[in-house]
Every structure is written in structure tokens, then in C-alpha cells.
Amino acid sequence: MGLANLWRTFRGDAGHVCPVWVVGTFDNRFRTLVHNPDKIFGDLVRPGMTVLDLGCGGGVFSIAMARMVGDDGRVIAVDVQRGMLGKVARRAVKLGLQDRIRLHHAAPGDIRLDPRSADFALASMMIHEVPDAFSFLSQVHDALKPESLLLILEPLLHVTNNRFRVTLDIARRAGFRILGPRCVPFSQAALLQAEK
């Protein structure tokens, strides 16, 4: 990776996804000390749910949600990079959670999920990398059951207050209602609901 690509990764440029080798530096068990899954979305994910981990990265949150949904629930770990999905698969097998997690390789610009199939979606630290946020959020809306929830987390380092407001405006146009902000360390965060 050249210095220009490393700089685009650091800035969080739209259309430039975080490389697999970088994810290990922050998507690890120490991350849960700062971003505790129980505190962030533990009240939103329940046993038996089907949940989406959009841009799942190395799978820290996929694993946490797999524990929350129980044997009757499913986590669909979605990423455009096969290397990320491989990391999730290895973690899931190591922890005996592979039966609760379905790996889903999305095409850039087309997440290809079944319509109205999910009860909850998490988009953690990834919408700023999406070239067409409206198309992406519209597809997420279509994959959620009516009135299901979407939690958006974006990094303070890359996403300003104004840029996050733009993302929320795009989400409204894509069919979401903004329920309000969420308190997540070092993050811009909001909870949204898919309108019918």
C-alpha cells in the first residue's frame, strides 16, 4: 500500500475502504473496552433476532451480537472484502459461534440482501467509506422489516458534526426516521427506524 492510499485510509475518504491489514490494529478485544457492545447495542439486540453487521470488518461486533441473538437468532456479517469475512469466520469457529453467523460478501454498490428479512442493523464506522450513501442506506432500509432499527456509528476522527448531519439527512431520504443520538465514546452515533 502506497502512502497516498494510507493517507486516504486515515482520512476516511468515501470510496476507500479500510484495508484488511489495518483492521487488526483497532478491531480486536481491546476495542470492547472502549466500545462495549452491551452498552452500545445490548438493549437493541435480543434472542431470536436476525441482525446485520454492515461493514463487519474483523467481526468484533458480529461475535458480540451472535452471543446476544442466541441459538435461534442469526447475524449476517456483511463486507465487500473477503479478507474481512475470513477474519469473522475464524473468530466464530474459535468461539463456537459459526452456526449463528452467516457471512455475506457484498458487491461494491450492491449489498444484495433479502428484502424485509432483518430485525436490526448496525453500520459501525463504515458509512463514510461508502461512495453512494443514499443507495447504500436505501438498500439497508429495504433489508429491514418495517419499524426495525438501524444504529449508525461513525468515527469522530473522520466524520465531523456537519458531515454526520448530512449522513442523517440522506438516511431520512432513504426512508429512515431519526430517533435520536446515542452516547458512544469517540463516535458520532444515532439510532434510526425504518419507516413502512
Image (cartoon, grey):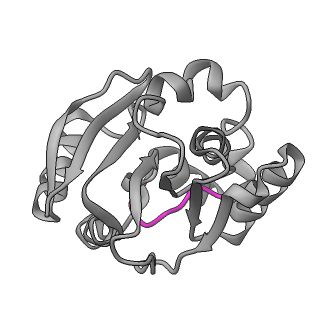
Q: What residue appears at the point 45 percent right and 76 percent down from the top-left corner?
A: 113
Q: Is residue 15 magenta?
A: yes
The residue lying toward the viewer, choosing from 96 and 103, is: 96
The residue lying toward the viewer, choosing from 18 and 98, is: 98
Q: What residue appears at the point 34 percent right and 21 percent down from the top-left corner?
A: 183
Q: Is residue 180 left or right of residue 149?
A: left
Res 129 → quadrant = bottom left
Q: Is residue 31 above or below residue 125?
A: above
Q: Is residue 188 magenta?
A: no
Specify start and end residues of the magenta stretch as a single range: 13-19
Res 164 → quadrant = top left
Q: In this rendering, does residue 111 appear at all?
A: yes
- Image coords of residue 112 (percent x, y): 45, 81
The residue lying toward the viewer, choosing from 48 and 164, is: 48
The residue lying toward the viewer, choosing from 105 and 100, is: 100
Q: What residue appears at the point 10 percent right and 62 percent down from the top-left corner?
A: 173
